[in-house]
Image (cartoon, helix red, strand yellow):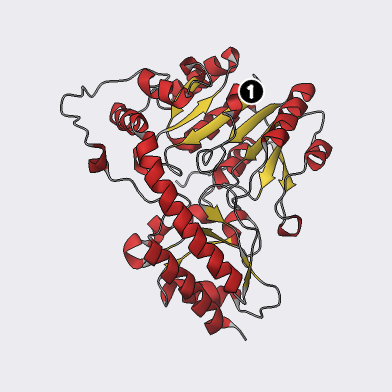
């Protein structure tokens, strides 16, 4: 007898169903859809794990790893390692929120930031960023969205997908606002170190603030599935730890060992990454300045941007993406992945090589030309 399914809590989203790994990396020549730097090669760590006992590890996370993450801005005991940033977001939202809560989320945004509160059944309201406003954050607009039952504000900076930033002064204003209203701030700072002048770890600024980050984007280690959250609130940390133990007890001891070895040499690795990102951003900027078809807000942090095809360009947008993908073997992240118009596309410039970026951008131009009426 067929079982009645009833209400299903989770749904697969376009960004996952249509991702490069689902489509098949072997079918992509120029991958501009990735939101990270290029994948790190394990051999570059020169690490020997032969004698590592494959045991459970500290439930908070490897102590040395947490010390590196704390970066002398917080106590290592304020750090909880998770399975990627997605694991941290899930633990935080399921620990803090109930269906009657109101949540304000920066939009557009990374899908996990949106879907976890929705799955709980919260009332989700967007703090909308627009290209017409240069994707600029507005404290006044944020304050206007706060309701008596607002429990959580969720922000992401450097912003995914636009690459825009806020200032430290703006951040301090946000902290003052959440403390005065008794609201929690979830701050996704995954690209924090991919800026010329990084903001402080936000979890170090207030007991109402919770930082989230991971090894996936700025470090290029998505395969080890290590993320973390940071909170100085001891009651929250106890709750978050209980959530982690209920879901997966602890992280992989192998993954955490790799992560700790990477952070021990972080400055060395990031200096090379930063040079690559700078070179590619210059290539991207030149392309945008000479494009007859595209417009953007130039990114100021991270390794991604969110340009769009100008409204004056008469184009079959569905045909464009199909042509770009199938004829030119080039992949970008279309706007509907972020619940906005498909004329937008997220382009990642940290992942591809210089040649791949130059060629992929030319393919975007050629695909537009093919599909303009």
Residue 75 % position (x, y) = 50, 16
Label 1 crowd (10 A; few <14 / some 14-19 / many >=20) = some
Residue shown at 36% from the left, 20% from the top = 64
Question: Extreme bottom residue here?
Answer: 373
Quarter where residue 188 is shown? top right
Q: How many marks?
A: 1
**Residue 14 placement (x, y as % from top left):** 53, 56
- Asked if 362 appears above or below 30 in the picture, the reply is below
- Expressed as whole percent of the image width and height from the top left, the position of residue 237 reads 54, 17
**In this picture, residue 139 sits left or right of residue 261:** right
State left or right for residue 120 relative to residue 325: right
Q: Nearer the viewer, residue 232 or 10?
A: 232
Secondary structure beneath label 1: loop
Is residue 40 in view?
yes
Drawn side of residue 244 relative to residue 140, left or right: left
Q: Is residue 285 above or below residue 236?
A: below
Frontmost residue, 290 versus 175:
290
Does the image show residue 102? no
Which quarter of the figure has residue 360?
bottom left
Where residue 302 sits: x, y (%)? 53, 47
Q: Residue at x 26, y 21 (%)?
A: 55
On screen, residue 273 above or below 56: below
- Determine the residue located farthest toward the left in the rendered image: 50
The residue sitting at 71% across, 34% down in the picture is 169
Q: Quadrant of the C terminus?
A: bottom right
Q: Is residue 237 above or below residue 324?
A: above
In the depicted view, which residue is nearer to us: 358 or 103? 358
Write the residue at 38% across / 56% down: 21
Which residue is identified by label 1? 205
Position of residue 265 in the picture relative to residue 79 (left or right): left
């Amino acid at each position: 007898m067929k079982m009645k399914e009833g209400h299903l809590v989770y749904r697969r989203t376009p960004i996952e169903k249509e991702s490069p790994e689902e489509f098949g990396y072997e079918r992509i020549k120029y991958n501009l859809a990735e939101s990270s730097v290029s994948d790190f090669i394990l051999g570059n760590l020169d690490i020997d794990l032969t004698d590592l006992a494959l045991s459970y590890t500290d439930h908070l996370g490897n102590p040395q790893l947490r010390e590196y993450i704390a970066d002398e801005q917080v106590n290592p005991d304020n750090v909880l390692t998770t399975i990627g940033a997605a694991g941290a977001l899930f633990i935080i939202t399921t620990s803090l929120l109930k269906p009657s809560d109101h949540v304000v989320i920066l939009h557009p945004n990374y899908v996990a930031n949106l879907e976890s509160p929705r799955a709980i059944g919260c009332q989700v309201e967007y703090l909308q960023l627009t290209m017409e406003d240069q994707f600029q954050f507005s404290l006044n607009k944020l304050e206007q969205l706060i309701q008596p039952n607002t429990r959580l504000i969720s922000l992401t900076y450097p912003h995914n997908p636009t690459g825009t930033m806020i200032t430290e002064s703006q951040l301090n204003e946000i902290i003052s606002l959440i403390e005065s209203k008794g609201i929690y701030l979830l701050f996704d700072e995954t690209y924090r170190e991919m800026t010329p002048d990084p903001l402080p770890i936000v979890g170090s600024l207030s007991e109402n603030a919770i930082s989230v980050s991971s090894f996936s984007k700025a470090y290029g280690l998505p395969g080890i599935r290590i993320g973390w959250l940071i909170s100085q609130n001891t009651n929250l940390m106890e709750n978050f730890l209980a959530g982690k133990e209920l879901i997966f007890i602890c992280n992989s001891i192998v993954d955490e060992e790799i992560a700790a070895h990477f952070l021990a040499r972080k400055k060395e690795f990031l200096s090379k990454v930063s040079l690559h990102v700078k070179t590619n951003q210059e290539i991207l900027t030149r392309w945008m300045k000479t494009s007859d078809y595209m417009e953007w807000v130039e990114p100021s942090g991270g390794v991604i941007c969110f340009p769009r095809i100008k409204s004056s360009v008469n184009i079959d947008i569905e045909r464009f993406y199909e042509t770009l993908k199938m004829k030119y073997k080039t992949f970008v992240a279309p706007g509907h992945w972020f619940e906005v118009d498909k004329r937008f596309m997220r382009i990642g410039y940290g992942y591809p090589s210089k040649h791949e970026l130059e060629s992929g951008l030319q393919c975007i131009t050629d695909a537009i030309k093919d599909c303009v009426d």
